[in-house]
Image (cartoon, helix red, strand yellow):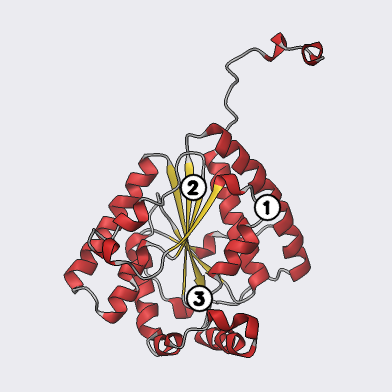
Amino acid sequence: MHMDLDRYRILPGASVCLSDRNSHETQDRTKPEAKARLRELKEEIDGLQERLYAESSQALLFVLQAMDAGGKDSTIRHVFGGLNPQGVRVWNFKAPTELELAHDFLWRVHKHVPGAGYIGVFNRSHYEDVLIVRVHGWAPEKIIERRYRHIGAYERLLHDEGTRVVKVMLHISPEYQSARLRRRLERPDKHWKFNPNDLKERELWGDYMRAFEIALERTSTEEAPWYVVPAEQRWFRDVVVATLVRDALLAMDPQYPAPDFDPADYPPGSFE
């Protein structure tokens, strides 16, 4: 099942218009074949993650951003669920605490960057400080502008120190978001996910799209690329994201470390 992923990558310096991007495309794939492919990809990822953990010299940071009801939680569950939890760390960034606000905006994320041998997944991230902060005017424009530069330098640092960074925006339409928010009200088991404030944020949809476009344009680099993934067909979204994870790990090419002993010194009879 070959897919064109280059169409989702934001090239460095490219301009971005999210309204021109299809949020529900499937590249003519079917749900059954996507589901089957996802199972294959997860097996590949599982094997690569074991090699990454054993090698313990590189790390993968996978950043997920989306509008409310964009599917971040379900993406993490479907793509990373079932992997060895010993080698995967997921962190969800909510509103910053007083302690976090007393430091620079990158302080609270840096301590959760995966160490060597691990896959780290950020559910929201340092990009909140150039998205929601920009939309609501919680920081002056000159500070927001500086943050794009700080983010670029920070992600280059991670890359140079052995952490591969891949960033995904799950792209949905306002109509899709409306349907998902209504679903949260209609299902008692989803009431806990509904926040009345989400309806106020919907009124700022255009501002959020522009904030995303600027962030994508300013911070998609060779070292830390952005991908805008159509997310309304969740089965297609999952296979795209899993392919990005698999491809990143393949490019890292983790290897099992050579043993510090000679296996030939321990013939089968040694254990009898």
Within 10 angstroms of label 2, few (less than 14), some, or many (20 or more) residues? many
In the displayed orientation, state which residue is furthest to the top: 265
Q: Which of marks 3 and 1 is nearer the N terminus?
A: 3
Q: Distance between the residues labelled 2 and 3?
A: 27 Å
| Element at label 1 | helix
Residue 28 is drawn in which quadrant?
A: bottom right
97 or 227: nearer the viewer: 97
- For disc 1, the marked residue is 42
Q: How far apart are marks 1 and 2 (CA)?
A: 16 Å
- For disc 3, the marked residue is 21
Q: Which of marks 2 and 3 is nearer the N terminus?
A: 3
Within 10 angstroms of label 1, few (less than 14), some, or many (20 or more) residues? many
Question: Which amino acid type is shown beneath numbered disc 1?
Answer: Lys
Picture residue at 68% right of the left edge, 46% below the top? 44
Q: Vertical placement of 239 versus 56: above or below?
A: below
- For disc 2, the marked residue is 60
Q: Which of marks 1 and 2 is nearer the N terminus?
A: 1
Question: Which amino acid type is shown beneath numbered disc 2?
Answer: Leu
Can residue 4 be seen in this snapshot? no
| Element at label 2 | strand
Question: Which amino acid type is shown beneath numbered disc 3?
Answer: Arg
Within 10 angstroms of label 3, few (less than 14), some, or many (20 or more) residues? some
| Element at label 3 | loop
Residue 48 is drawn in which quadrant?
A: top right
Q: Distance between the residues labelled 3 and 1?
A: 27 Å
Q: Do the residues labelled 2 and 3 touch (CB within 8 Å)?
A: no
Picture residue at 53% right of the left edge, 78% below the top? 69
Can residue 68 be seen in this snapshot? yes
Q: Position of residue 117 (x, y in %)?
A: 51, 39
